[in-house]
Amino acid sequence: MATYLRRGFTIVELLIVIVIIAILAAVTIASYNGIQKRAQASALRADFQAVSRKVLAYQSINSVSPTYAQFQADTTTSINLSQSIYKTFTYCGTSAQVATGAELQSGDKYYQQVGQPAVQDNAVDAAGVCAKLGITNPDGSAAAVSYILGAPLPTWTYCANENQTCSFSGTRTVRYGANSTYFVKTNVNASISCSNGTFGDPIPGVAKTCEYQ
């Protein structure tokens, strides 16, 4: 009568299987992350294009670019941002030029001057897009930067009223203005004068404050 021995897996064989499974899992995760990032970038470009269409439609009627308030009030087209993908989505510009900037949840950052292709540049803060593109008011002051409603807003901390000093620890981004209209300065160290002389006047005739993040 023949006797059959049943042999189990050796430690080496088990380790080989575990390594193969780990490699397959890593490849799958990397592939998923790549697909997710490409999908978010595509959604961002679609949102940028929607903003551009709305701005260009306003320009065709009024011969100037809309301010942030005019942009929000104009109903020529509707914009539904893909909110879940963003940390920040900004709008800035003058009567002649407009740009948008965004930071995705992944940390990737993009900007676009209306009428131009979107650019990925992770070194550019979404609040500093107009500064990056050299978009300034006729007097040379910084173009106003606002956060488009519907996108997740960053947390801002009040620090001073108009004509006072805004002080904080470290290096911060500081905005100056009121009623959702702000001029923004990035990489401010320790303190800054909260005044029209420092920032320009984003909203004449209205009392303004400084906030940092």
Image (cartoon, rainbow, N blue to C red):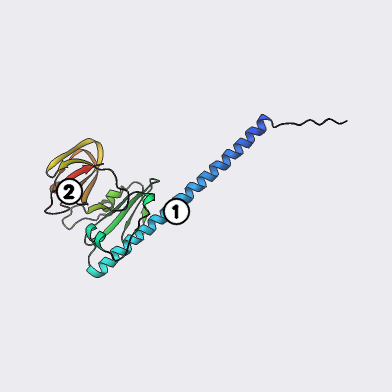
Left or right: residue 128 compared with residue 205: right
Q: Amino acid type of disc 1?
A: Ala
Cα–Cα span, label 1 and label 2 = 37 Å
Q: Which residue is mark 1?
A: 39
Q: Position of residue 122 (x, y in %)?
A: 36, 47
Q: Mark 1 or mark 2, which is nearer to you? A: 1
Left or right: residue 2 compared with residue 182: right
Disc 1 crowd rating (10 Å Cα; few below 14, some 14-19, many 20+) is: few
Q: Does residue 116 appear in the picture of this structure?
A: no
Quadrant including the C terminus: top left
Most extreme residue toward the bottom is: 61
- Name which of mark 1 and mark 2 comes first in the sequence: 1
Q: Does residue 89 appear in the picture of this structure?
A: yes
Q: How many marks?
A: 2
In the picture shown, does residue 16 fall above or below 66?
Answer: above
Camera-side residue of 172 and 150: 150
Q: Which picture quadrant has residue 111?
A: bottom left
Q: Position of residue 76 (x, y in %)?
A: 29, 66
Camera-side residue of 140 and 22: 22
Q: Which residue is mark 2?
A: 199
In the picture shown, does residue 44 fall above or below 11?
Answer: below
Disc 2 crowd rating (10 Å Cα; few below 14, some 14-19, many 20+) is: many
What's the residue at 35%, 55% (across, down)? 81
- Whether tag 1 and tag 2 are in contact, CB under 8 A, the answer is no
